[in-house]
Amino acid sequence: MDLTLATREEDGRVVVAVGGEIDVYTAPRLRDRITELVGQGHYDLTIDLEAVEFLDSTGLGVLVGGLKKVRAHNGSLELVCTQERLLKIFRITGLAKVFVIRDSVISPTG
């Protein structure tokens, strides 16, 4: 399985919709996309994991690295994830407390 990346802007944030598998082979592509976006001055990112079928420790490392990159510019990196098997990984690793994890790309109003 390959990795797909689709980038769009929504409500002042850049959304990267990720599909497929984020593993030791494909994670560098996601890391490069995040680095590219930060380099272009985009510091508020949302990584949409809804179409991700597999996530390993390398993928988690890329997400943490991305968070550090945007925080260096007072930005934020949020995740969109409703898949229980992925949420379980974030809970077990303690990263559920590090990342803002939403159930949709649309920010809550009010």
Image: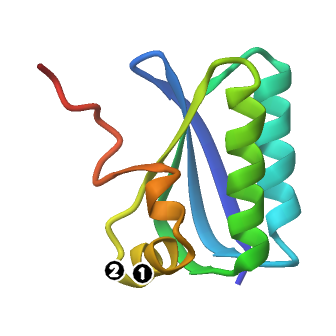
In the foreground, 60 or 107? 60
Query: Picture coordinates of residue 52 (x, y %)?
Result: 53, 71
Which residue is tagged 1? 88
Q: Residues within 10 Å of mark 1 (few under 14, many from 20)?
A: few
Label 1's element? helix
Query: Picture coordinates of residue 91 (x, y %)?
Result: 44, 74
Type of residue at label 2? Answer: Glu
Q: Residue at x 74, y 39 (%)?
A: 68
In the foreground, 8 or 99? 99
Left or right, residue 109 beside residue 66: left
In the foreground, 96 or 53? 96
Q: Are marks 1 and 2 in contact (CB under 8 Å)?
A: yes
In the foreground, 29 or 76? 76
Residue 93's image quarter? bottom right
Asked whether residue 45 is in view, the answer is: no
Which residue is tagged 2? 84
Q: Residue at x 11, y 19 (%)?
A: 110
Left or right, residue 78 beside residue 24: left
Asked whether residue 30 is in view, the answer is: yes
Query: Picture coordinates of residue 89 (x, y %)?
Result: 51, 79
Residue 52 lies, with reference to residue 74, above or below; the image says below
Q: Residue at x 61, y 23 (%)?
A: 75
Residue 62 lies, with reference to residue 45, above or below; the image says below
Residue 2's image quarter? bottom right
Say which of marks 1 and 2 sits in front.
Answer: 1
